[in-house]
Each structure stands twice: as structure tokens, then as C-alpha cells.
Image (cartoon, rainbow, N blue to C red):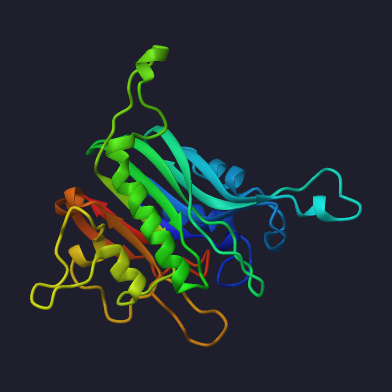
Amino acid sequence: MKLVSYNVQFGVGRDGKVGLERIAASVAGADIIALQEVTRNYPTNGGIDMVAGLTALLPDHHHVYGAAMDIDFGALMPEPPRPAMRFQFGNMLLSRWPIVSCRNLFLPRSRTYDKANLQRAALEGLIVTPLGPLRIYSTHLDHVSAEERIMQIRHLKERLFAYPMEGGAITGAGEYGFPEPPCPEDFVLMGDFNMRPGEPEYAEMTGSPDTLFGRRIVAHHPVDTSRLAGPAPEGSVSWTDLSGAGQHSRLDFCFVSAGLAGRVKTCWIDNDADGSDHQPVWTELA
């Protein structure tokens, strides 16, 4: 089973042009796709509806969309434009198998005055896969504050590990005559985490390495699939700094629950994709 995570940067590629076709072509071979920075009515990309555009280009996949930020800036103007143009910014999940249920998990944030701080979220999808029922998450953390990212990671991990106790979108569905959805412990967490390996946020997610034994696979920490599939090539990056400053970094990851660690077969970055300033990060589970 192939999974891919891709921050699609509003559909704007490394050449500065909008092209949903090349984004879809880059991920079409995946069974499950997690996308970030998917927008509606965003001025930089001509206001296109990326949800409609991408689903049309990937007709073999089911989809859900979660708008983390949903705002009508026109309503704040002295003469609001008609029709209203709601700006939506969020995450998307696509799957070859039906997405049984979904939840949009809003992450904590801080009020800022000097830099834009958008509401962030993790979109959760419950999917019955050939490997069994799994929870899949498409996630995007804050990009300007390490303090906020740590706060978001702590909150996200609480939600991840509380699921078996609280259930997902519904429990007790039998009262309405519906089958009870599965309640899997195992999950796959993908997205743009805006952190680099070795930074405090990364340790908050995966646990600090032991002096003698390194990072162990334990039940209470997600596991980075890239370290299970062998060492990444030297200089591997998933984000290209197009400003010219050369701050290229590994910001995008796939994490799995400890119960799935033994199923990770390979993990790689598609360095040829040019539909965004990020690169697709692939993981194969066997």
C-alpha cells in the first residue's frame, strides 16, 4: 500500500505557475494521498477551487477536505463584494477505498500582531484498507514559531492516542440502526510539520534518543517511517527555498503508530515533482 504526503503550496509550482495537473500526476500512483495548503478563493492562485480541480483530476480516489481557516475578508470591507468570496485554507485526504468517517482536528494557536498566523488543523480519515482499518491524518503545523509547533504536537498526540478510548466521529451508532465503525489503534500521520530532524519539535514528536540505544519504538510516540526504511540519502530535503537563501530543509514526514512500524517497507522523496516548493514524501506499507 502506497501513501504520499504533499504540501501543494496553493497549486503554485517551482516555476511560479499554477498547475494542478502536474500535482495530480505526481501523486496519482498512491493509494492514499495527504495534501496540505489546499485552498479555495486564494488570490495568489487566481482564486481557483483546488478541491474541485484535484478531485476531477483524480477520479479513482474518494476524498474529504477540511478547511482549517475559513474567512470572508470581504465582509470586513465598507462595501462587501457580491457574491461573498470565502477564503478557505486546509488539508485534504484522498483514498482508493471509501473514507468511512472524518474529523477536522483544530490545533492550538497564538494570537500574533507582526506575522500572519493561520489556523492549523489535522484532517482525520478512517479508512478500511487491505491492511485493516486505519486512521490517516493530513497535518500542517505552524511555520513561524517553534513554541507553537511544540504546543500543536502535544495536542495532536493527545488526540491520536485518545482515539481508542473516545472513538471517532460516532460511537453507539447502533442506536440509529447503523453498523458501528471500527476503532483502530493504528494510525498514519502525514504532512508538513515545519520542523527539521534533530530540532526540539522532532524530539517532542518521536521522543528523545537514548544515549546507548537511540530512539526506541514505543507505544506512546509516533515513529518516523524514514528511519525505519534505512538512512536517507545525504542532503535529502522536502522543501526548496525559492528565495535564493539556500535554506532547503526536510520539513515533511510520515509517522506511523508503533503497531505499524514492522509494516514499513520503503520511504522516499520524489525530487522530480515541480508542482510546489515542497516535494512529495512517499511511504510503502507491506
- Look at the picture and state if 61 lies above or below 196: above
On screen, residue 122 versus residue 43, left or right, reads: left
On screen, residue 16 versus residue 184, left or right, reads: right
Q: Residue at x 31, y 74 (%)?
A: 197
Q: Nearer the viewer, residue 99 or 172?
A: 172
The quarter of the displayed image where residue 242 is located:
bottom right
Residue 168: where, in percent of width, then height? 37, 35
On the question of residue 286 being in view, the answer is no
Q: Nearer the viewer, residue 236 or 173?
A: 173
- Look at the picture and state if 139 lies above or below 164: below
On screen, residue 175 versus residue 265, left or right, reads: right
Q: Nearer the viewer, residue 121 or 26?
A: 121
Q: In the orientation shown, which residue stands out farthest toward the right?
A: 79
Q: In the orientation shown, which residue stands out farthest toward the left?
A: 212
Residue 145: where, in percent of width, then height? 50, 72
The quarter of the displayed image where residue 207 is located:
bottom left
Q: In the orientation shown, which residue stands out farthest toward the bottom?
A: 245
Q: Residue at x 43, y 60 (%)?
A: 152
Q: Residue at x 18, y 54 (%)?
A: 261
The quarter of the displayed image where residue 162 is located:
top left
Q: Residue at x 49, y 40 (%)?
A: 64
Q: Nearer the viewer, residue 134 or 246?
A: 134
Residue 159: where, in percent of width, then height? 36, 47
Report the label total.
Answer: 0
Residue 66: where, in percent of width, then height? 53, 45
- Look at the picture and state if 63 lies above or below 29: above
On the question of residue 195 being in view, the answer is yes
Q: In the orientation shown, which residue stands out farthest toward the top?
A: 177
